[in-house]
Amino acid sequence: MKYFHRTSVSPDTAVARAAEFFGARLTPTEEAPRRRRFGGTLGQLSVSVQAEGGHYTLITIETDQPGESELDKLAKRFLTVVHGLAHSAHESRGAY
């Protein structure tokens, strides 16, 4: 599955948060300036960020699992965390 999210959080902050969030749950397998890859028993996941359109950052998360797998739920949970960084009034209500 592939997930996209556009945010006002800086690319460096997004990559740092991805390393924290996924690194606590999965094993880091690749580190590049704006890309991280993780793996574990749940599967493989990659996060890439790029500056887009001035003030925005595009976050792309890809997993090697079908939709609604545990890894995909983890990916969606990370995107809600990033959304909360950009909008402090955001309240996460998802079950993922």
Image (spheres, rainbow, N blue to C red):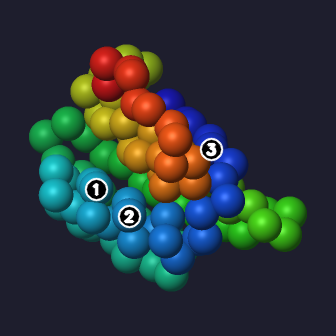
Q: Residue furthest front?
A: 89
Residue at image location 60% in from the left, 63% down from the top: 9
Q: Secondary structure at mark 2?
A: helix
Q: Position of residue 28 (x, y in %)?
A: 24, 65
Relative side of 52 to 28, left or right: right
Residue at image location 26% in from the left, 27% down from the top: 70
Mark 1 nearby-residue class (10 Å; few <14, some 14–19, many ≥20): some
> Which amino acid type is marked by label 2?
Arg
Q: Position of residue 92 (x, y in %)?
A: 40, 31
Residue at numbered disc 3: 5
Q: Residue furthest right?
A: 53
Residue at numbered disc 2: 17
> Which amino acid type is marked by label 3?
His
The answer to whether residue 16 of the structure is visible from this angle is yes
Considering only vertical position in the picture, is 25 above or below 64? below
Q: Do tag 1 and tag 2 residues touch (Cβ < 8 Å)?
A: yes
